[in-house]
């Protein structure tokens, strides 16, 4: 349980100006959060392996196997404009 002094101290550190009602609300909410953390700490996790995700993830990428790509002529064949086997694009200034 958090007392009013602790709530004021945390509010001062966070540069918050709390009214009396806000202090009481904050005291109740912070106490609830700490009570919830105590419940989580009480859970027996012996034998549970540490995980980073709730579900098992699997790599869906294919293997990186080198293969033959397009030739230069095949690559520029469908280009709107080509010059000497290269893409012809407008100059960007």
Image (spheres, helix red, strand yellow):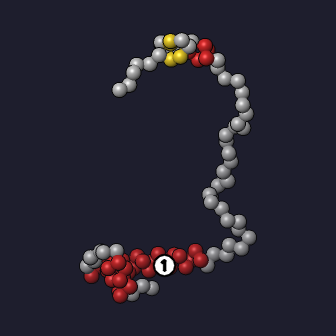
Per the image, label 1 sits on a secondary structure element best described as helix
Pick the quarter of the image with the C terminus: top left
Confirm whether residue 78 shows in the render. no
Q: Which residue is mark 1?
A: 34
Q: Is residue 83 above or below residue 67?
A: above
Q: How many marks?
A: 1
Please identify the quarter of the rendering in which residue 44 is found: bottom right
Q: Nearer the viewer, residue 53 or 83?
A: 83
**Image coordinates for residue 27, horizontal then vertical, percent:** 38, 81
Q: Residue placed at 64% from the left, 55% from the top?
A: 55
**Image coordinates for residue 79, horizontal then vertical, percent:** 51, 14
Query: On the picture, is 12 further left or further right than 57?
Result: left
Q: Residue placed at 34% from the left, 74% from the top?
A: 14
Please identify the quarter of the rendering in which residue 29 is found: bottom left
Query: On the picture, is 51 further left or further right than 78?
Result: right
Q: Residue placed at 71% from the left, 66% from the top?
A: 49
Q: Is residue 91 above or below residue 28?
A: above
Q: Is residue 48 above or below residue 11?
A: above
Please identify the quarter of the rendering in which residue 72 is found: top right
Pick the quarter of the image with the N terminus: bottom left
Crowding at mark 1 (Cα within 10 Å: few <14, some 14-19, many 20+): few
Confirm whether residue 42 shows in the render. yes
**Image coordinates for residue 33, horizontal then vertical, percent:** 47, 75
**Image coordinates for residue 28, horizontal then vertical, percent:** 39, 79
Q: Nearer the viewer, residue 38 or 12?
A: 12
Q: Residue placed at 47% from the left, 16% from the top?
A: 88
Query: On the picture, is 91 further left or further right than 57?
Result: left
């Amino acid at each position: 349980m958090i007392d009013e002094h602790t709530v004021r101290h945390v509010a001062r550190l966070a540069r918050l100006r709390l009214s009396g009602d806000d202090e009481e609300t904050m005291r109740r909410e912070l106490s609830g959060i700490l009570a919830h953390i105590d419940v989580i700490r009480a859970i027996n996790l012996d034998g549970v392996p540490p995980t980073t995700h709730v579900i098992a993830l699997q790599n869906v990428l294919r293997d990186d196997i080198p293969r033959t790509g397009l030739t230069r002529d095949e690559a520029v064949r469908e280009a709107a404009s080509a010059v000497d086997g290269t893409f012809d694009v407008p100059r960007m200034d």
